Amino acid sequence: MSSIPSTKRVAVIGGGILGVSTAVHLLREGASVILLTERGLGSEASGRSLSWLNSAGQRSTPYHQLRVAGVDRYRTLFAADPGREWLQFGGGLTWNAAGKGAVTEARHAYETSIGYNSRLLTPEQISAATPGIDPDAVPENAIFNPGEGWVSLPDLIEFLMEEFHARGGELILNAGKVSVMVDAGRAAGVETAAGGTYEADAVLVACGAATPDVVAPLGVDIPNGSPVSMLVLTKAVDHELKAVLNTPRAAVRPNPGSTLALDHDWYEEHITEHTDGSFSIPEDIVQELADEASKLIAGNPELKPASWKIGYKPIPGDGEPVLGELDHVPGCFVAFTHSGATLGLIAGELLAGEILTGSKHPMLSTFRPGRFS
């Protein structure tokens, strides 16, 4: 990005990792930034993300390359202070259900073919590769990806917001629904539900699963495949787990304070969405997820849910990120992706560069919103 100070005024809608990261990158380059949130910071998807930093499995080459760059940016942040308990690199361990060992082997072969660090392990080999896992939970084999990590996004957002404020960013919390203002066919600022208006030279819409709804009035159609999901945080428990676990019945990662974060998708049918937009799930289902996670941990400690959050997990209709400027509304940019955690830092960096310079970054070329036109 250019080192020449920018005089641009940019409005960012959304207080999750993509909005906050882009805002901070803009401020670093001298832009004036106003950040507006519907409620609080990290109150939506960023506050209930498993936030596994990876590019495991099979996806398009541009998406894989962007995710690898995303993990690289986290490694740079980690190297500056490896003692941060909210950002760690302990690897990732994945296995399939009994009878599907061949599927695991095929994934390992693919990862190896593209140079992704992948080790195929028997249950007996796991304890030597990564601690804190019950080998009896692994039916046949597992893949260990030693280069992967995890981040607690609420902590990362808090960290970035310290720089946001130090650099003079303007924050408006609890703004309600925010819309994009257009003048002469170009983004001209934003307007809050209460009628407050804020002029800007450019606007970034980074509202998670709500992003397609925010740009729809502009005549832009972005297919939305966002499902309802849940993240559970357990009470503190003694464990030695370092890796992120992705298994047939539970996904688990370490979390600050000796707690664990739990996720999966089998419980989605038990979630109820209410007319006021809130969600609920029977507590016994939450406990069942915790019990499934306990089976994965060495010693099978009793896991008790401390809290859980439910909402829409941002996933574009075709599964690929949507990043960049709207063709029909110059000056309006979007950031909408399933991998908000992994891409959080790199997407903010590249989008800020595009917003300030007008030059399109080649790594985002296949992710433009115009592909749905």
Image: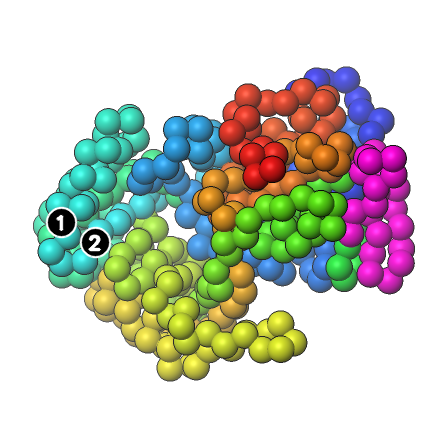
| Quadrant location, the C terminus | top right
Q: Amino acid at mark 2?
A: Asn
The label shown at residue 343 is none
The label shown at residue 101 is 1
- Looking at the image, is 300 positioned above or below residue 125? below
Mark 1 or mark 2: name the one nearer the start of the chain: 2
Q: How is the image coloured?
A: rainbow
Query: In the image shown, does 225 or 195 lie closer to the viewer?
Result: 225
Quarter residue 40 falls in: bottom right
Chief secondary structure of the magenta span? strand
- Looking at the image, is 179 positioned above or below residue 249? above
| Quadrant location, the N terminus | top right
Q: Which residue is mark 2?
A: 96
Asked if one can make out residue 356 in the rendered structure from this viewpoint, the answer is yes
Quarter residue 18 falls in: top right
Crowd tier of the residue under label 1, counting other residues whose Cα lies within 10 Å: few below 14, some 14–19, many 20 or above: some
- Percent across and percent down for residue 105 are 16, 41
- Looking at the image, is 146 positioned above or below residue 190? above
What is the total number of numbered labels drawn onto the structure image? Answer: 2
> In the image, 365: left or right of 254?
right
- Cα distance between the residues tagged 1 and 2: 7 Å
Residue at point 26%, 59% (across, down):
248
In magenta, the rendered stretch is: 179-202
